[in-house]
Amino acid sequence: MPNIAFVNGKWSSISAAKVSVEDRGFQFGDGVYELIRTYQGEVFHLDEHLSRLEASAKEIEITLPYTGSQLEKIIRLGCRKSGFTDVKIYIQVTRGAAPASTPFQKK
């Protein structure tokens, strides 16, 4: 399963991964992301990437579904599952599915 996805807590092939058309990230770009690279099997600056992801999510009031430690484990497991030594890891976190007429209201 080299080209894999981890969506809503489940591993799948890229082709089987599904996101709701009502996901606010899909509809409005309402989310945050990080791109992390590995080189020769080593994750590049993981702590810095996860800190930036957390800060970005906090800025737009999205609660991350996993702690930094949990994300690190998921990332490392995904790297092992892929079987590649040089990978690109895209982390995308959105506010989730909601009808398009439901506006985000800043606290």
Image: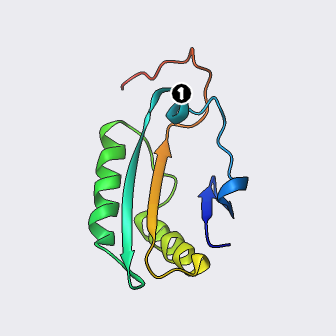
| Label 1 residue SS | helix
Residue 105 or residue 26, whichever sits in front: 26
> Mark 1 highlights which residue?
27
- Disc 1 residue type (three-letter): Gln
Crowding near the residue tagged with mark 1, few <14, some 14–19, many ≥20 C-alpha atoms within 10 Å:
some
- Where is residue 17 drawn, in percent x and y? 68, 52
Q: Residue at x 62, y 72 (%)?
A: 2
Colour scheme employed for the rendering of this structure: rainbow
Q: Residue at x 50, y 37 (%)?
A: 95
Report which quarter residue 90 is drawn in. Answer: bottom left
**Quadrant of the drawing holding the N terminus:** bottom right
Relative to 70, 47 lies left or right: left
- Where is residue 106 drawn, in percent x and y? 36, 24
- Where is residue 6 drawn, in percent x and y? 60, 60
Placement of 79 over or under 66, stated as above or below: below
- Where is residue 44 drawn, in percent x and y? 31, 74
Placement of 16 over or under 81, stated as above or below: above
